[in-house]
Image (cartoon, helix red, strand yellow):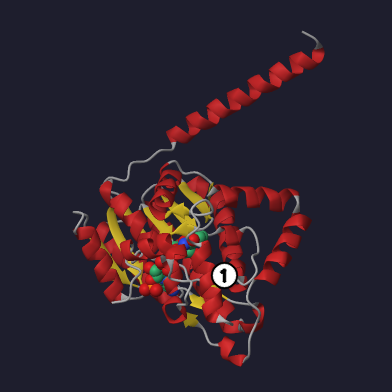
Amino acid sequence: MNNKQQTAVAASALAVGAALIARRLRSGRAIRFHNRSVVITGGSRGLGLLIARELGREGARLTLAARDRAELERARQDLASRSIEASIITCDVGDRGQAERLVDEVVTQRGTIDVLINNAGIIQVGPLEHMKLRDFQDAMATHFWGPLHTILAAVPAMRRNGGGRIVNISSIGGKIGVPHLAPYCASKFALTGLSDSVRGELAKDNILVTTVCPGMMRTGSPFNGWFKGRHRDEFTWFAISDSLPLATIDGTRAARQIIDACRYGDAELVITWPAKLAVIANAVLPEAVALGMSIANQLLPRPTNESGDQARSGWQSLSDWAPSKLTTLTDRAAAQNNELPH
Ligand code: NDP
């Protein structure tokens, strides 16, 4: 064997050794969810409800939080029909007092919080021309201040308990800026930064923090999103993109991946292959990604007159194309995941 071959063999052996050690360390961090007190913000529908169904099957003691009491009650009944018990608490996580009360109530009811899943989210779609300061403030309140409020409130209880797990559901939009999603992306970048930075500081307290950056998941949420500008056109492209089988992932599969990342205390989870490739492309070829985004922007609906400043929900933005055969997967997910209006 010549020198080059020896170096290649040594490097391969090191890589295999490192992978084996990493795997061993990962399985050493595994927890069981049975009897654990788990709080899921945004647990009333979509991904939060899917995570609740999966964790409920593993015997977790669940608390779901969201703003709409009736929707939370329907989520509770959905879980009860699957023999899963859950407490529900009405809470706007963007309000610090409400987030603190949520944590206090859970600690009083359950004794502690073992797992905090910051999943609450809003989607606002439209061109920058129609986005107002208020849209950015709302996005920051939900995606940045909300998780910060719950983390600051829950960490003392976790420390007293000898540790815990925190999962922050950011987004691929928290890694790459996407046109027509400026408030969403800006606030998800803030959440990614918060999540990644507290991870290092809380590890010493045995609190493991996982940052989750999903690509498009079929949770059924486009109907409950908010659309500005040519709102019907914006809803149409968004709902059709959300239904593309190869570009998106089934919500239940995504929920299972998230639960596994939490179980093993993984630092980061990027969900869907398109999202993983986009993260790599953005790191290696930022100019090409920027060009791609500017081309995509040209293809998206143009801004309109001042009527476009008003945000309309997905339900108020239905078009000939959405719902249609092209959005079948999203429509089905909406029916399954408590996304329909009552
Ligand atoms: P949904 O719209 O279906 O669910 C959002 C949930 O958050 C609802 O329960 C909603 O209830 C709650 N919520 C919103 N604002 C607040 C608030 N201020 N305080 C408390 N609860 C709130 O969305 P998804 O299930 O699709 O998304 C879940 C998470 O995943 C979000 O953070 C989203 O950004 C993220 N994500 C989703 C992707 C997708 O393709 N679906 C892709 C990448 C990330 P209520 O309105 O009653 O408060």
Q: Is residue 289 above or below residue 74?
A: above
Q: Considering depth in this image, is 146 or 206 the residue closer to the camera? A: 146
Residue 258 percent across, percent down from the top left: 44, 49
Which class describes the residues within 10 Å of circle 1: few (<14), some (14-19), or many (20+)? many
Query: Between residues 131 and 139, which one lies in front from this camera angle?
Result: 131
Please state if 120 lies on the left or on the right of 61 as rendered: right
Mark 1, secondary structure of its residue:
helix
Residue occupied by mark 1: 184
- How many labels sit on residues? 1
Ligand 1 quadrant assignment: bottom left
What amino acid does circle 1 point to? Answer: Tyr
In this view of the protein, can residue 219 be seen by the observer?
Answer: no
Q: Position of residue 41 (x, y in %)?
A: 39, 64
Observer-nearest residue: 56 or 330? 330
- Whole-percent x and y of residue 215? 54, 56
Work out whether residue 114 can be spotted.
Answer: yes
Check the image and name the residue furthest to the top: 1
Q: Which residue: 32% across, 50% down? A: 54
Q: Residue at x 47, y 76 (%)?
A: 320
The residue sitting at 40% across, 57% down in the picture is: 116
Residue found 30% across the figure and 67% down from its top = 105
**121 w.r.t. 36: above or below:** below
| Residue 289 placement, left or right of 37 | right
Q: Quadrant of the N terminus?
A: top right
Vertical side of 323 occupied by 196: above or below: above
Image quarter hosting the C terminus? bottom left
Going by the image, does 196 lie left or right of 316?
right
Q: Is mark 1 within 8 Å of ligand 1?
A: yes
What is the x, y in percent for residue 53?
A: 30, 54
Query: Outermost residue toward the bottom?
Result: 306
Relative depth, front residue between 154 and 46: 46
